[in-house]
Amino acid sequence: MKTLPVLCCGPQTPALDPAEADLLAARFKALADPARVSILNRLASADEVCVCDFVGALGIAQPTVSHHLKVLRDAGLVESSRRGTWAFYRLVPDAVDALREALGG
């Protein structure tokens, strides 16, 4: 793994693989909306959440909730399963851990 050169007062930071940087950027971009941040926040405190619960909790229409969940799913941050007519969502722990690691934690 390459590291960036040490600057006068900066830490040695491992260089990101370009593909990894692209993936991280897409995931952070998916979080560039308060509703999506709120969705991830709610999912972080539960094993899974029914899509119907987001509508009431966020105060936004079901089609809008579905759009936000699709953005998060496409970014690999959440996954879903269906039970009858309801969709249930949960975090993808490895994806969230990668974001945390990118922020130095």
Image (cartoon, rainbow, N blue to C red):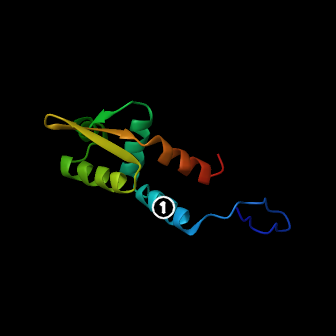
Spot the residue most to the left: 85
- Taking 47 as reference, is 102 left or right? right
Q: Quadrant of residue 45?
A: top left
Q: Quadrant of residue 8?
A: bottom right
User: Percent from the top left, x then y, of residue 105?
Assistant: 64, 45
Total labels drawn: 1
Query: Which residue is tagged 1?
Result: 23
Of 5 and 31, the residue lying toward us:
5
Mark 1 element type: helix
Of 93 and 58, the residue lying toward us:
93
* Quarter of the image with the N terminus in it: bottom right
Classify 30 as above or below 22. above
Residue lying at 54% horizontally and 62% vertically, measured from the top left: 20
Classify 30 as above or below 58. below
> Which amino acid, by three-letter code, is at mark 1?
Leu
Residue lying at 34% horizontally and 44% vertically, measured from the top left: 79
- Taking 50 as reference, is 12 left or right? right
Residue lying at 47% horizontally and 41% vertically, measured from the top left: 93
User: Percent from the top left, x then y, of residue 44?
Assistant: 44, 36
